[in-house]
Amino acid sequence: MKFASLGSGSEGNALLISSTSGTTGTTVMLDCGFPIRETERRLQSKGMTPVDLAAIVVTHEHQDHVGGVFKFARRHHIPVWLSFGTYQAVQKHADGVDIHFCRDGDRLAIRDLELVPYTVPHDAREPVQYVVHDGQFRVGVLTDAGQSTPHLIQALGGCDALVLECNHDRQMLANSSYPYSLKQRIGGVFGHLSNETAAEILSAVDKSRLRTVVGAHLSQQNNMPELAREALHGVTAGSGIDVMLACQEEGFDWIHLKK
């Protein structure tokens, strides 16, 4: 099993998760916030083409996650999975796309992969994040959530790798030039995870199998890579868990999970 990011941040998000079983392979793309040509370019940089994608799986309707989904899926005849609430928010863009619905706790069997969506607190219609596994390894994804909940802590337990939002540093956000209302939204319980809250989540989840954690969705205005890395290292120091960061421009290259 392996996973890679095409880019992570407020200007666009897309995550690839791939598994091989014998002579067959399955790759899904989680979200697609980039235009068609940019998505194709970023896929090529990871050694992939659109024909390699078995599905696009959507977390929620915000443009940096869904902006390119339907045009890309329509052009390349790729099925799309999303919650019904998310569909209600974007249905005018979904004509001609093979749509499938999912909800919290469903198990989506997409060839060699199984994806389990779980509900998160975010200011969207029916936002979900996903845990993906192939029978051997589990990758948990949590971006775009405002706070920790017992439900998400349980969902992310026992993963081999986590992609975990570290959106902002609380002090940098407080001191930023953002309008007060935007600061309240970002830092609120339905906004985005601060470095500190990400560290609290990482501390609380079952890390018995965890080998890699990737800090993701960093704000370019209200965070710095060294602050996000420091927060995650504060939990993982001495544990043998690798800490990495995703960036907006390149995401991160393939991370391979092996026994």
Image (cartoon, helix red, strand yellow):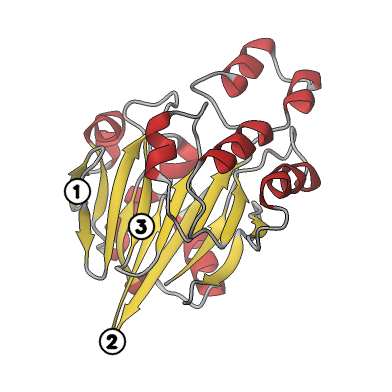
Q: Quadrant of the N terminus?
A: bottom left
> Which residue position is annotated with label 3?
132
The residue furthest bottom is 23
Mark 2 vs 1, N-terminal side? 2
| Mark 1 vs 3: CB contact within 8 A | no
Q: Residues within 10 Å of mark 1 (few under 14, many from 20)?
A: some
> Which residue position is annotated with label 1?
99
* Lateral position of residue 186 relative to residue 206, left or right: right
Q: Is residue 120 visible?
A: no
Q: Label 3: state its secondary structure.
A: strand
Q: Position of residue 192 (x, y in %)?
A: 56, 30
- The Cα atoms of the two marked residues, 1 and 3, are separated by 19 Å
Depth check: give the residue in front, 204 or 191.
204
Depth check: give the residue in front, 30 or 98.
30
- The Cα atoms of the two marked residues, 3 and 2, are separated by 19 Å
Q: Is residue 37 visible?
A: yes
